């Protein structure tokens, strides 16, 4: 999950749209993980931008995959909270995006949770799920300047 906390807050506009980097180590490694695996990511990309013929092609705009944006376009963005799950095929893309934001001078709070998989926080009884949800809520509170 990625948030870019802005004034005024627009959660719908702030959710990170991942560019599915098709050859990152996590995409190659996590072919059979719970909830979301690289096969799901390939399928999703195929339907994400129907007018782009080739997955991950240069025709994919930065508005659809912000990691493609040049640093100049990322400079001045608000502080960002981004979390990745260790066993998620999208993990590396999230980390690379956070790194690119840092290069652009954007304050980034990057969390990576060991032993977790994509959307594991939906399993509400697990201690890691509770930790992730707690961290997510703290990031929202910080961004909204709530106590």
Image (cartoon, helix red, strand yellow):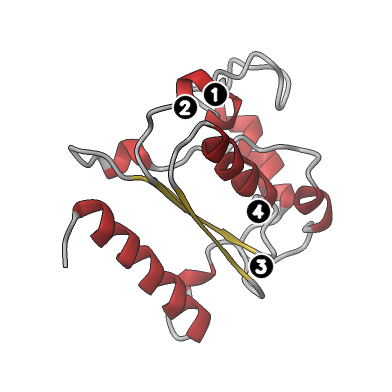
Q: Earlier in the sequence, mark 4 or mark 2?
A: 2
Mark sitting earlier along the chain (4/3):
3
For discs 4 and 3, the disc positioned in front in the rendered view: 4
**Disc 1: CA contacts within 10 A as few (<14), some (14-19) or many (>=20):** some
Q: Which residue is mark 1?
A: 71
The relative height of residue 141 versus residue 96 in the rendered view (above or below) is: below
Q: Is residue 35 left or right of residue 17?
A: right
Give the structural element (helix, strand or loop) at label 4: helix
Compare marks 3 and 1 and give the one earlier in the sequence: 3
Q: Which mark is residue 74?
A: 2
- For image coordinates 46% across by 41% down, the residue present is 16
Judging by the rendered image, the residue that carries numbered circle 4 is 91
Residue contact at pointers 4 and 2, CB within 8 angstroms? no
Which residue is depicted at the point 47% across and 70% down?
Answer: 121
Distance between the Cα atoms at labels 4 and 3?
14 Å
Q: Mark 4: few, some, or many residues within 10 Å (few <14, many ≥20)?
A: many
- Look at the picture and state if 104 lies above or below 73: below
Q: Which residue is at the front of the view, 54 or 146? A: 146
Disc nearer the start of the sequence (1/4): 1
Q: CA distance from mark 2 to mark 1?
A: 5 Å
What residue sits 65% from the left and 50% below the top? 90
According to the picture, the residue beneath numbered tag 3 turns out to be 34
Contact between marks 4 and 3 (CB within 8 A): the answer is no
* Pair 1/4: label in front: 1
Which is nearer the eye, 95 or 48? 95
Percent position of residue 133, x then y: 39, 71
Label 3 or label 1, whichever lies nearer to me, is: 1
């Amino acid at each position: 999950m990625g948030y870019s906390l802005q004034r005024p807050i627009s959660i719908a506009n702030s959710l990170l749209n991942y560019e599915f980097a098709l050859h990152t180590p996590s995409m190659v490694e996590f072919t059979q993980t719970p909830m979301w695996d690289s096969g799901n990511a390939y399928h999703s990309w195929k339907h994400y931008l129907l007018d782009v013929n080739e997955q991950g092609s240069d025709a994919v705009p930065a508005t659809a995959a912000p990691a493609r944006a040049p640093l100049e376009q990322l400079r001045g963005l608000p502080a960002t909270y981004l979390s990745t799950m260790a066993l998620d095929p999208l993990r590396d893309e999230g980390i690379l995006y956070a790194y690119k934001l840092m290069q652009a001078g954007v304050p980034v709070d990057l969390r990576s949770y060991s032993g977790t998989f994509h959307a594991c926080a939906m399993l509400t009884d697990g201690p890691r799920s509770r930790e992730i949800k707690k961290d997510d809520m703290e990031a929202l509170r910080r961004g909204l300047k709530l106590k």
